[in-house]
Amino acid sequence: MIPKVVLLPGDGIGVEVTEAAKRVLKYVTEKFNVEFELVEKLVGGASYDKFGTPLTDETLQACFDSDAVLLGAVGGYKWENLQHNLKPEAALLKLRKALGLFANLRPAKVYPQLIDSSSLKKEVVEGTDFVVFRELTGGIYFGEPRGYNKEKGWNTMVYTRFEIERIARLAFESAAKRKREIVSVDKANVLECSQLWREVVNDVSKDFPNVNLKHMYVDNAAMQIVRDPKQFDVILTSNLFGDILSDISGIITGSIGMLPSASLGSKYALYEPVHGSAPDIAGKDRANPIAAISSVAMMLEHSFEMNKPAELIYSAIKKVIADGYRTQDINNGDCKLVGTRVMTDKIIENIEKIYNEQALGVFTL
Ligand code: NAD
């Protein structure tokens, strides 16, 4: 069976970085003689403009029929005043829920040559390498009741044992393969919901006696990530806290334009850069495509067990950075400033170069 990947470029720079990701995916799969079927659909504001909804049933069905989904980003000024369920971002929440993508993985790894782009001191950030496991389909973003009127706005934070247990298990499994250190982040001193979170995480930890578990309150975790990011290996947390902590983790590694993510469920998977549609730079060939291209590598690894092509992409990215090519967001002065397209060209050139050097031969699924 030919693997099917649905591409959802979305809005703003989502379109530009997905084009870059598509070029790399096509190049690398051709190189390894693997056929992929690529299906492209509208999502977010682009879908709203054409169909009056940010996510059509047809797009959703294409995702149900897929082996993996690759998304750019959604949103923009133009759609900011739409009612909640018509906003581009509503498509993302609906997709995550419908595909059962309960775990969002966001690696935060520092490239040595980009240390100067970090807002932190070199000695603090050097060697940072951790993953945030963010619960994605529960918590306050989905809890009912929700609403607002002129006097009051309200949302509900709710988690079930089942929801906490399945993300905790994934995070522990990952920690067991890494440095066997996990920090579970909550706000159990204030929120009952977090008390259950802590209880369930403790229960799951009994099945992983070799993994060292620590609990941390979210305010302290935010502080610790900027104070000493090297202390972390795996961070496990809920939807709201994970949203914030993974952005902090992103910025300390240099730029949000470098950060890929994977959202996994028991049946489906979606890969996307961490960043949004960046309307301030959209259409200007200024977006850093590395987050989207690294998302392709994560997809090859997690959904298709194509580790060698994934490694090739990571190596090509490292080489391009080492050669001094930079998009504006990671521009640290003495470098070759390039746009989205040239950065993608350089990555593809290096994939070719490294592939030839390694003479990897033919790789089959
Ligand atoms: P953003 O991530 O789009 O941009 C934040 C800042 O980072 C901007 O200055 C932007 O220029 C810069 N930036 C982001 N990605 C970059 C890249 N690849 N290369 C270079 N610079 C980059 O966040 P925002 O401004 O808060 O949101 C803009 C829109 O995106 C909003 O409509 C928001 O709702 C939406 N959004 C979507 C997603 C998603 O689709 N997953 C995620 C976050 C925000």
Image: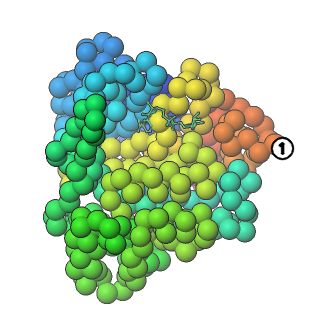
Residue 77 in view in this figure? yes
Spot the residue most to the top: 50
Give the position of the N terminus as an image quadrant.
Answer: top left
Residue 38 in view in this figure? no
Vertical arrangement, residue 328 with respect to residue 258, above or below: above
Q: Residues within 10 Å of mark 1 (few under 14, many from 20)?
A: few
**Most foreground residue, 185 or 192:** 192
Q: Quadrant of residue 286?
A: top right
Q: Which residue is located at x 27 percent, y 79 percent?
A: 202
Q: Which residue is located at x 39 percent, y 68 percent?
A: 185
Q: Residue 63: x, y in percent?
A: 24, 35
Numbered disc 1: secondary structure: loop
Describe the colour scheme in one phrase: rainbow
Spot the residue most to the right: 334
Horizontal arrangement in the rendering, residue 3 relative to residue 19 (left or right): left
- The residue tagged 1 is 334
Q: Which residue is located at x 38 percent, y 35 percent?
A: 71
Vertical arrangement, residue 43 with respect to residue 306, above or below: above
Horizontal arrangement in the rendering, residue 229 relative to residue 63 (left or right): right
Q: Residue 365: x, y in percent?
A: 34, 50
Q: Residue 95: x, y in percent?
A: 25, 38
**Most foreground residue, 361 or 51:** 51
Vertical arrangement, residue 272 with respect to residue 235, above or below: above
Three-letter amino acid code at disc 1? Answer: Asp
Horizontal arrangement in the rendering, residue 21 relative to residue 127 (left or right): left
Q: Quadrant of residue 198?
A: bottom left
Q: Quadrant of residue 287?
A: top right
Spot the residue most to the bottom: 209
Horizontal arrangement in the rendering, residue 280 relative to residue 152 (left or right): right
Q: Residue 90: x, y in percent?
A: 29, 33
**Most foreground residue, 177 or 122:** 122
Does the beta carbon of the residue at mark 1 sit less than 8 Å from ligand 1?
A: no
